[in-house]
Amino acid sequence: MADDLRAQARHWRTAADALTLLRARSGLTRRELGERLGLGSGGVSDLASRLRAARLIVERTVSARGAGRPTSTWHAHPEAPVALAVDLRHGDWRLGVCALDGEVTMLVAGVHDGDPDRSLALLRRRVTAAARSLEGRVVSVGVAVPGQVSGARLLQASMLGWRDVDLARLGAGAGVPVLAGNDASMAAIAEARVHPARPAVLLHLVAEVGLGGAVVVDGRPVPGARGLQGEFGHLPLADPGLACPCGAHGCWGVAFDPREVARRLGDPTPADPRGYLGGLLARPDVPDAVLRLREDLATRLGRGLAGLVNVVDPDVVTLGALAGPVRDAAPARFADAYDLGLMTLHRDRPPLLATATAGADAVLAGVGLTALDQTLDAARLASWAEGR
């Protein structure tokens, strides 16, 4: 009896490891899974059979790469456990479902008025309704926020004006745990997962309302002691006389805040900050003041990014959200600043620099993947299988 229990425990630990690999890279073949898990073909076949019976995976037959017999790839079963993923942004929010293999389905989106209590009450109702509609499949809720987090607590979101906000309340109606993360870090996880270069060290930089990002090593963001990592926009690279809502002065990201951009141009404070800045970057014909602004932002981006490359030494750098359009609005200015800022070693062999490819749902995918990784362990899988 004890031997049977130990064997079952080993099986579900292996199953948990397999599903973690599947989230790190969707569409893995049996052979690839076997190599990563240290299992032979018989072991992989037995594992696949058990996971299919538990309604955790489905397999799809595909042609083998090169010569050989067809093989199969693993994907999430349509009735498998899921995580709800929330992307709480400046003025609006999105809610989606993240499947076991990291695929995201958007459910609903809306706006909030900036008040934390009212905004979270609204989101809690939406999360609860979504969990009920999924009939027991939701195992966790992941929440991405534009600020610093520790556990399920938002420590500070300076651009929102929120401090010390308990995000765990979002899962109370669904009866599941809540995990929170910085939105730029969550996007970086998704980017590392889909990037064709499969980078060992990825530096992801995001521009939206300010700057943020993450360093991702082997698919996981490098953590900080208190969850404050990746706050690239608060490097003191700007005018020391310029105050940032975070409490510091001279923060790099302040210059990229659409509200600061509007002030510089003499425009009214934009109701849609992201749309305002995106429009300025995309306009084909612009007045001289806007042209100078775009050149300034591209120069600031290139100089700061070179500094990050010098410190991090990544093999791939990706530009997310509006960071790519900032570069493309004045590419020569960006290139000059970036090149001049790099150490000679990096200038001779620079990391691959590319626009992010994870798409509009990158934040949802990243926080959903993180929520599943941290809650769907061997014990939870065993309990799930017993209920099928």
Image (cartoon, helix red, strand yellow):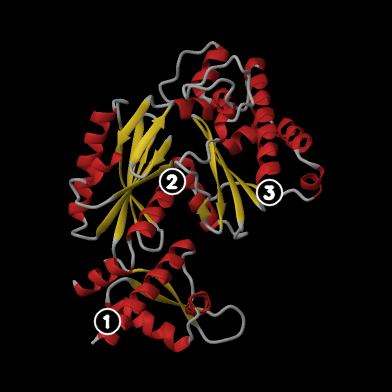
Residue at image coords 33%, 43%: 152
Going from the N terminus, do you reach mark 1 or mark 3 first?
1
185 relative position to 251: left or right: left
What's under tag 2, amino acid-wise? Val
Please indicate whether residue 55 sits to the left or right of residue 278 in the image. left
Residues at marks 1 and 3 touching, judged by CB atoms closer than 8 Å: no
Q: Which residue is mark 2?
A: 363
Q: Is residue 145 visible?
A: no
**Which of the 4 image quadrants contains residue 303?**
top right
Q: Residues within 10 Å of mark 1 (few under 14, many from 20)?
A: few
- Identify the element where label 1 is drawn: helix
Residue bearing the label numbered 1: 5
Helix, strand or loop for disc 2 = helix
Which x, y percent locates residue 211? 54, 33
Front: mark 3 or 2 = 3
Q: Quadrant of the N terminus?
A: bottom left
Residue 244 x, y percent position in the rendering: 51, 21
**Residue type at mark 3?**
Asp
Q: Mark on residue 313?
A: 3
Q: Give the camera-side residue of 27 and 186.
A: 186
Residue at image position (37%, 57%) is 374
Q: Quadrant of the C terminus?
A: bottom left
**Label 2, label 1: how far apart the Cα atoms are:** 39 Å
Query: Which tag is nearer the camera, tag 2 or tag 1?
Result: 1
Place of residue 362 in the rendered image (x, y in percent of width and height, measured from the top left): 46, 48
| Snapshot quadrant of residue 290 | top right
- Mark found first going from the N terminus, 3 or 2: 3
